[in-house]
Image: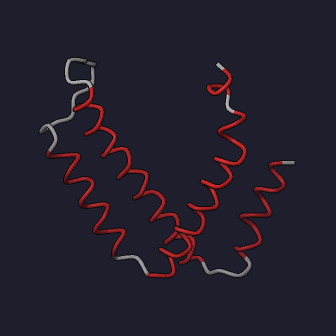
Amino acid sequence: VSTWIAGLAVGLPSGVWDVGTFADLSSIGTLFAFMVVSIGVLIVRRAYPDKRGSFRVPFGPLLPLISVASCLVLMLALPLETWIRFVFWSIAGLAIYFAFGKKNSELAKT
């Protein structure tokens, strides 16, 4: 059932929007994810400075900061319509998460 719902949620807008709209939405979502990961690298390195893992970020905090700035510049170059859709779908996703997912997660049960 969830596959059908997801298919309809993706398939129906494809009949209305053009390919460029989907490309812009993919771009803003991917850039946002890259930006969140780069910010996460900065936070984890600062929160746990004594933990030494096998992975190290080259050039310390400079590379993640450049990554965040680059993603933000590219995101700001996208059309306003893309931003509106991105904010709408992000709010919808967060609403679903807090209404259903958080209460029913396996981590919440432990």
Q: Is residue 18 above or below residue 70?
A: below
Q: Is residue 79 above or below residue 5?
A: below
Q: Is residue 84 left or right of residue 63?
A: right
Which residue is at 36% across, 68% downward?
75
Spot occupied by residue 36 in the image (x, y as percentages of width and height): 38, 49
Spot occupied by residue 15 in the image (x, y as percentages of width and height): 74, 78
Q: Is residue 4 left or right of residue 56?
A: right
Colour setting? secondary structure
- Residue 14, located in which quarter of the rendered image? bottom right
Question: Where, quadrant-wise, is the C terminus in this rendering?
Answer: top right
- Residue 56, located in which quarter of the rendered image? top left
> How many marks are shown on the rendered structure?
0
Which residue is at 56% across, 73% downward?
85
Q: Of all residues shown, which one is farthest toward the right?
A: 1
Spot occupied by residue 93 in the image (x, y as percentages of width and height): 62, 56
- Residue 106, located in which quarter of the rendered image? top right
Which residue is at 26% across, 29% downward?
47
Q: Is residue 30 above or below residue 100?
A: below
Which residue is at 62% across, 81% downward?
18
